[in-house]
Image (tube, rainbow, N blue to C red):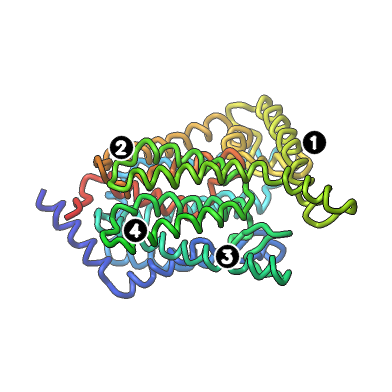
Amino acid sequence: MGQVNRRSAGEINLFSSRVLRFLILTFIALLPVQLETTKALGFRVAPADAILAAVAILLVGTQGPSVLLRDLRKRPAVIGAAILALWFCFTLPVTARALGRITSYALINKILGLGCLILVLATFSTLINSRELVSWASRWYVCFGSVWNALGLLAWVIYAVGRIHTPFVFGPGRLSGLLIDPNAYGGFLVTIFLMQLGTLQLAWRPWARWGGVWNSLLLLVGIFLTISRSAAVALCAGGLLLWLEYQGREKRVVRLLLLIGMVTAILIWVQPLWQLRSCSLGAPEVTEESAEAMARIQNLSQRFSVMLAALKAFTRSPLWGIGLGVFPHLEGSGGLIIHNTFLWLLTETGVIGFLIFGFVMVAIWLAYRKAKVLGDSEIAGLASVVIAWLGLMLGIEASYQRHFWFLCALIVSLGVPYCTARQ
């Protein structure tokens, strides 16, 4: 027991380093930032990955690889994620047999990308090893995310008033932040909203509580302006869990905000219909807005067609899958990826890959159940984020979102036996 306490104290002292604290804050701040380098490199560059590498090197150099590997054995989610990456590698021969080559998309976007996400999970679940540090990281995550939302709303107003395009706005008026994809950005804002609700009871001063309420409403405006159906599903899924799990003092306020969130989710789904109707009544010619609304309505039928094609491909090789990156090359796919994480895993990595990923999700959930404390709304907010992530996966391939893996790392760290209790 003495060794456990000394181990925890040593890690907290490491975290108190000004350099390391600055690096972690920078990493959190850069989580919703990607650079559009697809044409040049074949993938989007995330500046946060450079910070992650620096933090991981510092952690390994200070603690030692043998100590870290021993500690990682206490984290089933990390082990499961590593096994998933290994299974992805095993599917490469299937990819080569189907396409005659192994694509850079499979190697870089899927395998190397998953490696970066595993590093996020392993690094921060090891480094942030106390209830106090989890709270510290969570609050900064909400703070930085709220700033990004405010900047996005300002950019949207500039676009709506002056038709001035900025990287924060995608196409005709959909917020995308610096994540480029409105669906991914909508999922990010959902995490900020749910965690903001989880911290409302921690605001002891009335002005801080009201500030949290108004910030929650601004986040819902941002979520709505993404017009992301996937984010709407995530909002409903995570909001439902938080409704059931929240036991804090501000329960009535939180539930009222969750109800407003549910209304926001409904409005996102019906918004294209309203937009198309208003455009058709106002002007007979096709406008940019009406064309976008029509495209989004037609997009639903296209998504279902792609999913049916994916199910058909899955039946060809249900156990092993058809190979990473193979589906867009199949007839009937239209060159599109499968906009559903679960169906993508089943189709390209088979039942085995799907079950391994399921093991990771279950391990994260069990870590939450182990750390759950009645009335601790902050932990409930983190758990609702995981459920929101699963909801987001129904509409896009959302398993490669860095911010979700970071928040899961906080949950995993809470489930480790030597994580010190909040004082």
Task: Determine contact: label 1, label 2, CB under 8 Å.
Answer: no
What's the residue at 46%, 51% (across, down)? 191
| Mark 3 vs mark 4, CA separation in Å | 23 Å
Amino acid type shown at disc 3: Gly
Q: Mark 3 against mark 2, which lies toward the viewer?
A: 3
Mark toward the start of the polypeptide (3 vs 2): 3
Please give the label number shown on residue 357: none
Amino acid type shown at disc 4: Arg
In this rendering, the answer to whether 97 lies above or below 203 is above
In the rendered image, which quarter contains the C terminus?
Answer: bottom left
Q: Secondary structure at mark 2?
A: helix
* Residue 279 drawn at (x, y percent): 80, 51
What's the residue at 59%, 60% (across, down)? 179
Mark toward the start of the polypeptide (2 vs 4): 4
| Circle 3 crowding by C-alpha within 10 Å: few under 14, some 14–19, many from 20 | many
Q: Secondary structure at mark 1?
A: loop
| Circle 1 crowding by C-alpha within 10 Å: few under 14, some 14–19, many from 20 | few
Q: On the image, which quarter does residue 339 sit in?
A: top right
What's the residue at 63%, 42% (across, down)? 324
Q: Mark 3 against mark 4, which lies toward the viewer?
A: 4
